[in-house]
Amino acid sequence: MRTIEHWICGKSTSGESTRRGPVWNPAAGEQQAEVVLATSRDVDDTVRTARAAFEEWSQASLSKRASVLFAFRELVNAHLDELAEIVSDEHGKVVSDARGEVQRGLEVVEFCCGIPSLLKGDYSDQVSTGIDVYSFREPLGVCAGITPFNFPVMVPMWMHPVAIACGNTFVLKPSERDPSASTLVAELWREAGLPDGVFNVVHGDKEAVDALLDHPDVAAVSFVGSTPIAKYIHERATSTGKRVQALGGAKNHAIVLPDADLDFASDHLVAAAFGSAGERCMAISAAVTVGAAGDAVVDAVSEKAAKVKVGPGRDPASEMGPVVTPQARDRIVGLIGSGEEQGARITVDGRGFVVPGHEQGFFVGPTVVDRVTAEMDVYREEIFGPVLSVVRTETVDEAIRLVNANPYGNGTAIFTSSGEAARRFQRGVNVGMIGVNVPIPVPMAYYSFGGWKDSLFGDKHIHGPEGVSFYTRGKVVTSRWPHVEHPVDASYHFPTHD
Ligand code: NAD
């Protein structure tokens, strides 16, 4: 059985650990590899390596850093298909979707190629006679990234290119469920000319994560994953004085008004609910219909959901693959059942879905649950599977109130032909990322990505300008070069002269 190892200081290693975790092939329903699970001593060794590499990398010129970023960009682009296939094989998503994920990660790398512009400081000449003030930003030190299974390339790339471009060194703890892509990414960094020790990958579970959170030489932690863990990471790492951004789970609503193009809206709802088997933090999991849109939306999405082509991720005909683990499948099936028991109506039922030739695969078919209410578990829980709940409301204000009453605030969308309704919605919802006739409004790399409420703990959104701010800290210099002809007397009071 293949063993997936850590990547520390430019080399693969198993460290001292004897613990291993299973890596599944979700389409086949069998274990395909094992991943090494780090001990806290392995983590300590990795952080020490990264701390030592920081001394040199933090002093590398902006030109040098930009040239490594450009080379890395070319290499990721050249290996895009290979990365997508690795992702598909361990995560289960279809290869075309995995290519899209790598592409979105690449856009963050491209943003970081402009690091010399992004780190330009401010300069104020002659703020007082003979005195200038200027500012610049410096890297923090060793930054850690702890990432979820659902985007094993893109989510880490929200972090490490930005941190490294800013002059930090990085320790990535990827999801133990689909760890292989991180090894190829590490090799590409090395080939791009990044010095050993600047980018490291340590695999593991809670033991490795806790060791990173408590390590005195880790300056900042970026986390993406479920809400309970995000909250835990934020509390534990801030208590040891670290800078933390912890992105959590989601329950994304799409409001559909009766004046929307309902054919367009239902096409997009189905793609946004069932793409990647619903295992996206920006997936639409609740369609909120207003008035007469209800019946029409349920009929259209049910018809379209039943036609989604479900199969292994490597089959080019597949539009949706399996879910990631048998535990995920069982949990999703259980939540669909709870909806039925609590009075919802299942119009398309993906339970017991079998793909011929892949009978053991972790498949759940697209599922549509109508007449869901805010009290039901199928609405309250983040299902993270191919399940679209339909909640019916009477007015746009009632729909907005429903979105705002939900504890999550990651993404939301509205389908309408009314500019007035769209504007009321964008100003009225307490959500970080908003789509108008766009169901999955993921910001481009040169904006920052982040939700509100239980979808993000910490102050800074991820990547884009807020990412650069997160991975650096500012210095402001007040400078005077005394001139013999204009002596300046020291004073005991706060200066008031000009
Ligand atoms: P998860 O929270 O189970 O795991 C995320 C990371 O935390 C993994 O690296 C895992 O090893 C680690 N971890 C898990 N349990 C831990 C514990 N008890 N102590 C310390 N570390 C622990 O999340 P997941 O199942 O891998 O990913 C799916 C979740 O991620 C969903 O909730 C989804 O909404 C969320 N997500 C959010 C965003 C966003 O941008 N807000 C993006 C992608 C995924």
Image (spheres, rainbow, N blue to C red):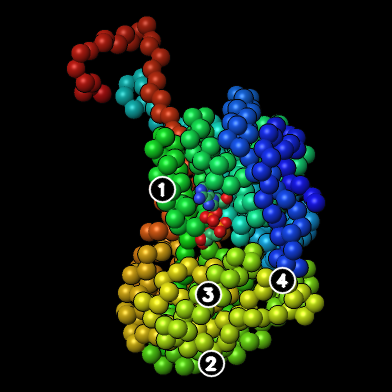
Q: Is mark 4 on a helix, strand or loop?
A: loop
Real-space Cα distance between discs 2 and 1? Answer: 41 Å
Residue that carries the numbered disc 4 in the rendered image: 361
Q: Is residue 400 left or right of residue 170?
A: left
Disc 2 marks a residue whose amino acid type is: Asp
The residue to which callout 1 is attached is 458
Marks 3 and 4, Cα distance to the nearest angstrom? 17 Å
Q: Can residue 104 be seen in this view?
A: no
Q: Which amino acid does label 1 sit on?
A: Gly
Q: What element carries label 3?
A: helix
* Disc 1: CA contacts within 10 A as few (<14), some (14-19) or many (>=20): some
Q: Earlier in the sequence, mark 3 or mark 4?
A: 3
Mark 2 or mark 1: which comes first in sequence?
2
| CA distance separating discs 4 and 2 | 29 Å
Q: Position of residue 412 (x, y in %)?
A: 45, 70
On the image, numbered disc 2 is attached to which residue?
Answer: 299
Real-space Cα separation, disc 4 to disc 1, in angstroms:
38 Å
